[in-house]
Image (cartoon, grey):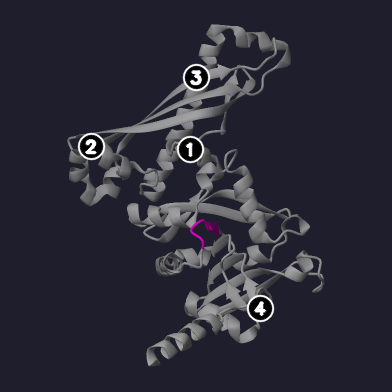
Amino acid sequence: MKVKVSIIILLCGLLLTGCWDKVEMNDRAYVISLALDDLGDLLEVTYTIPNLPVITSQGGGEATKFVKTTKSRTLVEANRNFGKKSNLRLNFDHAKVVIFGKDFLEDDQNLRKVLDHFDRNPEYSKALLLLATKASGKSLLESVPNGEETTGIYLSQVFVNNSQETITAKTIELSDFITEMHSNDGNGVMPNIVFQDNEVIVKGLAVIKDYGLTGWMEEEHVTPYGWVLGKGRHSVVVADMEGVLVPYKISELHTNMRFSLEDGLLTIRIHIKSEGDVAEFIFEDHDKLFRNTYIDELEQAIAEQMVSQVDDLMDVLQDDYGIDIIGASNQLKMENREIWRDTKSDWQNFFSGASIIVESDVNIRRIGLSK
């Protein structure tokens, strides 16, 4: 009898107990974007939180977002301090963007600690976009692109809607970046954003060396960087054909690397093979595109232009940064384990001094319907 009574009491307890940690939606502060800035002894964390009543047309004032800032020694403390001056509980389930200020990235310990926090905390999405800025992250979140958009949502839409057309090589999500940092000894890149002419613009890349900012890759190097990574679909190459600028839009692109080591000198051969279309020409002269000899000349001119752009990029990577951010080490591990064993202990120096030979094959598949 006592056993039956005990079971009944236990079941009643399970059925009647509510969720002790349940928080109502109206009591949450849904963070859409974060910015992290280094103030010396303190970390400044800025949060963008949408004003849900305004967005859902249920009142709540005129502002579509709130920008809140806390200062503390760590991100965990900053998140806790937020609760001391707000009646809302922070929630990161819908966070889309993290913006790192220049000063924050210059201290290599900052990125190490924050990446560890993001990686071990399941509340952050692994698809979180990581972005850098030469200004402060706070100033970017306080900006109002297009006059009304919440900056974090706007930036997320920029990457989602244009990733195939213009910014494939720039898109860095949290999971990818963490993997890149582990596999490349703390070296990698993340997109640089600026607020200019009342617009938030993606412009170049921040280059990370040993978890700290080492420089900024200019915009003209981003497209060839994508080619080397094999991510150049939908990019455009412009060839000058006797004063006529002919754009070639890439539809397919494949890149491979081959390695050799002789007398202590590493040679890396980068072969880029692409297919694409002529996207524009001179109206009166379009018959030229139906001549095989002209197409051959055009393909050669495009290939030379691609080689030239990649050569310029390699000079910057080897001379200015001295780091491998093109995945050559990972390719070498798979392609030639013997050479990798001979170079891995001093890989960055081998890469910086390597002879890099770039080759390009171009195949124009379509020239349009006009004749």
Residue bearing the label numbered 3: 363
Amino acid type at circle 2 is Asn
Residue 25's disc number: none
Q: CA distance from mark 3 to mark 2?
A: 29 Å
Residue 153 visible in the picture? yes
Magenta-highlighted residues = 125-132
Image marks 2 and 1: residues in contact by CB distance under 8 Å: no
Q: Amino acid at mark 4?
A: Asp
The disc placed on residue 27 is 4
Q: Residues within 10 Å of mark 1 (few under 14, many from 20)?
A: many
Circle 2 residues within 10 Å: few <14, some 14–19, many ≥20:
few
Q: Position of residue 304 (x, y in %)?
A: 47, 24
Task: Say which label, 3 or 4, has the lower sequence index.
Answer: 4
Is residue 184 visible in the rendered structure shown here? no
CA distance separating discs 2 and 4: 57 Å
Mark 3 to mark 1 CA distance (whole Å): 17 Å
Q: Residues within 10 Å of mark 3 (few under 14, many from 20)?
A: some
Q: Amino acid at mark 1?
A: Lys
Mark 2 or mark 4, which has the lower sequence index? 4
- Tell me residue 7's x, y (percent): 43, 85
Residue 231 - label? 1
Whether pointer 4 and pointer 1 mark residues with C-beta atoms closer than 8 Å, the reply is: no
